[in-house]
Image (spheres, rainbow, N blue to C red):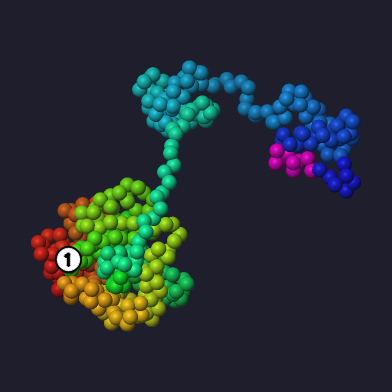
Amino acid sequence: MIPGIRLDYQQLRTISPKAARQAILQILRSCEGNVSETARILGITRTTIYKAIRKQKEENLDDASRAPKRVTNKTESSIEEKVVLIKQKTNYGPLRIKEELLDQYGIALSQHTIRNIVRRNRKRIRKKETTNHKRSPRQFIDWYQAKPFEIVQIDLKHIIDQKALSMDQISHIYAHNLPIYQWGAIDVNSRFKLIAYSQEKSWTNGLTWFLWVTSWLRSHGVTSNIVYTVDHGVEFGGDCWWKITELRHLLRGFGCSIIQNQKRHPEQNAHLERSHRTDDEEFYIPRILSINNTQELYQEAMNYLYYYNNVRKHSSLQGKTPFQAVQQQCKNIDVRMRIVPPIILDRVSVELGPWSGYHVLAQYLIHLVPVCFVAVHYFKSYFRSSDKCLRCY
């Protein structure tokens, strides 16, 4: 050993018992087989050294298994084979294997015993081979060539944002039970915007929001194919393939499609993400402390949305408002489109009635919600009227 350097055998053993025994044997050779000197250098007993020598003769320096060599109440091997066979064929869990074992062979075992049998034989049980499906790259979207409402970005904003609002404003929102989520949809070409509110971030509200945005655009003269771009939030389907499939199938009937952005790439919804900052600076920060209930929020939000779409001039539109940009390019657009009600989503799916099918997903019982009346009556008029006009004005 080099003077001043000491090998810590116990620490080496926690890393690898095999490497620790190899170190013993190497130092033993350097000490010309002197067991006492080796034990003194490493700070271990001579029994430990003799054990390393014995395991070297056995050609296995690893620790032996601590499992008992004899188990008096161990399940018979024939029964174990039946459990393993069922597991290989079905890949069931312990509870279902217990039922199959009783049905097929009349053998009663506890699910805990079956679990232990599966663990003991896990090397013999072949798992089902799975193929990892790589996601295809996101489809290219040309923002600059898109016409009005050909590309619509959809996203969810958490209003309780400590980077934007003060603690007094956040406390005010909680104290007055105001909605904490803002659902947004913005047209890439004209920056025309629609918003909604909810207390919950749910798949049901996501479906309702897609249907509301689509029905509003279609009922006011938008006939182009609409491409929605969304992130991977659970409210928009997330990574659940069947939800995305069902959503695409649902929107296809309205002449729409959906594209999921890449994960952790908010710039792919850049226009809507930028508008969230405007919402904070021009609506929530100056106005939220004066709003004391949901009805007042609805009225204030409707005024703000009218201001955003019809009064506020956008530098990206060469000083025009979003609705002016829409009118300039779409001559047949319905002028009533400019007044957009910011609906409350939480109970809309219930208020639509059982004919829609989505009421069964909702978390609420049927109640009358005054702030949703405009949205509900309009939503029904879209599906039930032949001319798809806005009857609630």
- Dot 1: within a 10 Å radius of its alpha carbon, few (fewer than 14), some, or many (20 or more) residues? many
- Please tell me whether residue 4 is drawn above or below residue 168 in the rendered image: above
Q: Is residue 263 left or right of residue 312?
A: right
Q: Is residue 388 visible?
A: yes
Q: Which residues are magenta?
A: 8-16
Q: Specify the farthest residue to the left.
A: 386
What residue lies at 31% left-to-right and 56% top-to-bottom? 258
Query: Quick check: is 363 in the magenta stretch?
Result: no
Q: How many marks?
A: 1
Q: Residue at x 44, y 21 (%)?
A: 82
Tag 1: residue type?
Ser
The quadrant of the image that shows the N terminus is top right
Which of the 4 image quarters holds residue 99? Answer: top left
Q: Tell me which secondary structure the magenta stretch mostly adopts.
A: helix
Q: Position of residue 84 (x, y in %)?
A: 46, 24
Towards the viewer: 369 or 302 = 302
Q: Answer above or below: position of 44 versus 136.
A: above
Whether 9 is among the magenta residues is: yes
Indicate the quadrant containing the C terminus: top left, top right, bottom left or bottom right: bottom left
Query: Among all residues in the image, which is located at the extreme front?
Result: 145
| Up/down of 57 relative to 247, above or below | above
**What residue is drawn where x is 41% and y is 20%?**
107
Q: Is residue 175 visible?
A: no
Q: Residue 302 location in percent, x, y?
A: 26, 75
Q: Residue at x 14, y 69 (%)?
A: 390
Q: What kind of element bears circle 1?
A: loop
Give the percent coordinates (x, y) of residue 355.
16, 53
Mark 1 highlights which residue?
Answer: 219
Residue 319 x %, y %: 32, 82
Judge by depth and name the residue closer to the eye, 20 or 293. Answer: 20
